[in-house]
Image (cartoon, rainbow, N blue to C red):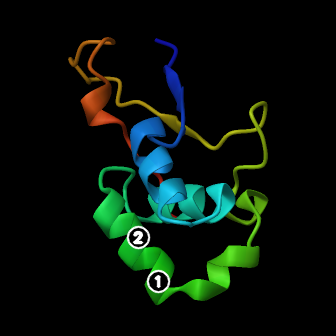
Amino acid sequence: MEQEIEQWRPNENLLEILVTMGITKNAAEIALYYTGNESADAAATFYFDNPDIEGTSLSVIGVSDEKDVKTVPKDEGDDSSEEDDSKNEMCYL
């Protein structure tokens, strides 16, 4: 059976929160990527603990643009509904 592939995308609600805090969109996306894309607080803490990410490109973590997003294979035995986005699988480098 062919495996389904999910593309990593930042949580848009969390991204908006981080940007309104003055964090650049690029840095906010990186912080969300490294903190599991589940918490604005965790991502903000990561950002302030790692100020050097400000100049980092998403391509450094394997995400360069909409057409080249890091993909993660889903488990073949995964019985979760395709509609359930709350169980996004993450790939950490």
Q: Nearer the viewer, residue 5 or 59?
A: 59
Res. 83 image quadrant: top left
Q: Are marks 2 and 1 in contact (CB under 8 Å)?
A: yes
**Which residue is at a point 49% across and 46% down the rendered structure image?**
16
Residue 46, percent across and down?
42, 76
- As measured in the structure, the alpha-carbon distance from the residue carrying label 2 to the one carrying label 1 is 6 Å
**Numbered disc total:** 2
Q: Residues within 10 Å of mark 1 (few under 14, many from 20)?
A: few
Between 47 and 5, the one nearer to me in the picture: 47
Camera-side residue: 1 or 32?
Answer: 32
Q: Disc 2 designates what residue?
A: 44
Q: Position of residue 1 (x, y in %)?
A: 46, 11
Q: Position of residue 85 (x, y in %)?
A: 32, 25
Q: Is residue 59 above or below residue 82?
A: below
Task: Please name the residue that numbered disc 1 is placed on.
Answer: 48
Locate residue 60: give its quadrant: bottom right
Query: Which residue is at 49% across, 33% downward?
Result: 73
**Percent of width and height locating residue 90:** 42, 48
Residue located 41% across and 39% down the image: 13
Kindly identify the residue that appears in the image at 41 percent across and 30 percent down.
74
> Which quadrant, please, contains the C terminus?
bottom right
CA neighbours of label 2 inside 10 A, class few (<14), some (14 to 19), many (20+): many
Disc number placed over residue 14 in the picture, else none = none
Q: Amino acid at mark 1?
A: Phe
The correct choice, above or below, for 35 with respect to 5 in the image is: below
Q: Is residue 36 left or right of residue 57?
A: left
* Residue at disc 1, secondary structure: helix
In the image, residue 76 sits, relative to residue 58, either above or below, namely above
Classify 2 as above or below 17: above
